[in-house]
């Protein structure tokens, strides 16, 4: 498991109850899964400017929180495996700042929030708005908070990038923080389309030059495997896929990731984003993470 540098961590509380009021759907009969109190220690993780590519971040005065399942490293039932849960967007002022699209300064190979060929990309966008006026960042956060509780119940440690409406960490800051403090990185988003078209993950572009660029070259197959597991988990929980569940996208997150890392699009601007729907998405993501974790254990 990744170890957080002591210089970047401040002990914030031990055996703190981190159970929120948000429910999760039961898997078998569609009923409600009974809430459980989860004991967990929590540590504030600050941005460390010595991390690889830290100098490429422009917004990094915020902090994340690392939750240890069971309250200590010796607690029974712990998996000793840290999931970075990144609720997409939620950084005020991020759209007015730019960062390098790729660590080596090469241009983007696909379009997206930023155009194909862009050497610099928006540090972090504000996200889309649902048809009812709800900001995407709010639904991302609701899903992320529900996922945190499920993961802690299952013995995973969780690095929460954002737990409020705003955290001053851009996409590069979030990614390098995950690289150094977690084993996998799951960023939660909803697509900007408005057709309720289904879920998918942003797969690594098949462009040869992109897949040969480090750190993508060393990790793109891991990104793809994690993405496929997340899609399987969501599909098993009743979520329809967009196409085959993938869409090639050159993302800042993927370009800087040195751990298995995925941007998962759990719906779009027309999708149900109620508390219950977000809890169901969290269950699908948790099941996908468990599939991926089990595959790692089998391979050992």
Image: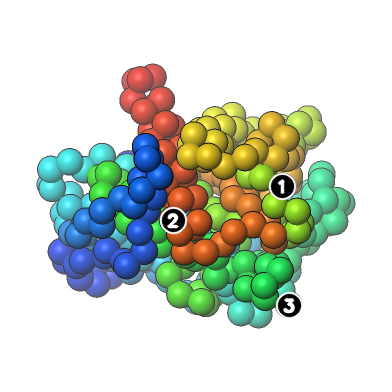
Tell me the crowding category of disc 3: few under 14, some 14 to 19, or many 20 or more residues within 10 angstroms, Cα based: few
x 31%, y 50%: residue: 33
Distance (Cα) linking label 2 and label 3: 32 Å
Kindly identify which residue carries mark 2: 279
Viewport quadrant of the C terminus: top left
Among the two numbered marks 1 and 3 on one chain, the one whose residue lies closer to the N terminus? 3
Query: Is 233 in front, or is 227?
Result: 233
x 15%, y 64%: residue: 15
Kindly identify which residue carries mark 3: 96
x 62%, y 67%: residue: 136
Q: Which mark is residue 47?
A: none
Tell me the crowding category of disc 1: few under 14, some 14 to 19, or many 20 or more residues within 10 angstroms, Cα based: some
Which of the two marks, 2 or 3, is nearer to us in this view?
2
Distance (Cα) linking label 1 and label 3: 30 Å
Among the two numbered marks 2 and 1 on one chain, the one whose residue lies closer to the N terminus? 1
Kindly identify which residue carries mark 1: 197
Distance (Cα) linking label 2 and label 1: 19 Å
Q: Residue 212 is drawn in which quadrant?
A: top right
Residue 102 vertical placement versus 169 (above, below): above
């Amino acid at each position: 498991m990744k170890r957080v540098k002591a210089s970047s961590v401040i002990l914030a509380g031990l055996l703190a109850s981190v159970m929120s009021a948000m429910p999760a759907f039961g898997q078998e009969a569609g009923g409600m899964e009974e809430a459980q109190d989860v004991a967990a220690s929590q540590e504030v993780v600050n941005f460390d400017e010595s991390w690889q590519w830290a100098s490429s971040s422009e917004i990094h005065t915020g902090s994340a929180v690392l939750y240890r399942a069971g309250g200590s490293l010796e607690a029974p039932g712990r998996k000793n495996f840290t999931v970075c849960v990144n609720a997409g967007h939620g950084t005020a002022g991020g759209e007015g700042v730019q960062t390098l699209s790729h660590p080596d300064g090469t241009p983007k190979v696909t379009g997206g929030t930023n155009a194909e060929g862009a050497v610099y990309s928006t540090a972090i966008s504000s996200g889309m708005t649902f048809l009812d006026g709800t900001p995407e960042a709010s639904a991302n956060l609701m899903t992320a908070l529900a996922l945190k509780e499920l993961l802690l119940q299952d013995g995973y440690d969780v690095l929460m990038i954002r737990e409020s409406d705003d955290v001053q960490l851009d996409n590069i800051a979030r990614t390098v923080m995950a690289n150094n403090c977690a084993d996998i990185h799951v960023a939660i988003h909803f697509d900007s389309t408005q057709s309720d078209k289904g879920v998918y993950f942003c797969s690594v572009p098949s462009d040869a030059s992109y897949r040969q660029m480090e750190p993508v070259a060393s990790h793109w197959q891991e990104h793809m495997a994690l993405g496929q597991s997340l899609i399987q988990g969501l599909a098993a929980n009743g979520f329809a896929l967009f196409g085959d569940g993938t869409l090639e996208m050159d993302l800042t997150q993927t370009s800087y990731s040195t751990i298995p890392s995925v941007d998962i699009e759990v719906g779009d601007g027309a999708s149900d984003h109620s508390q219950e729907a977000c809890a169901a998405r969290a269950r699908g993501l948790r099941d996908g993470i468990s599939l991926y974790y089990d595959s790692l254990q089998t391979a050992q």
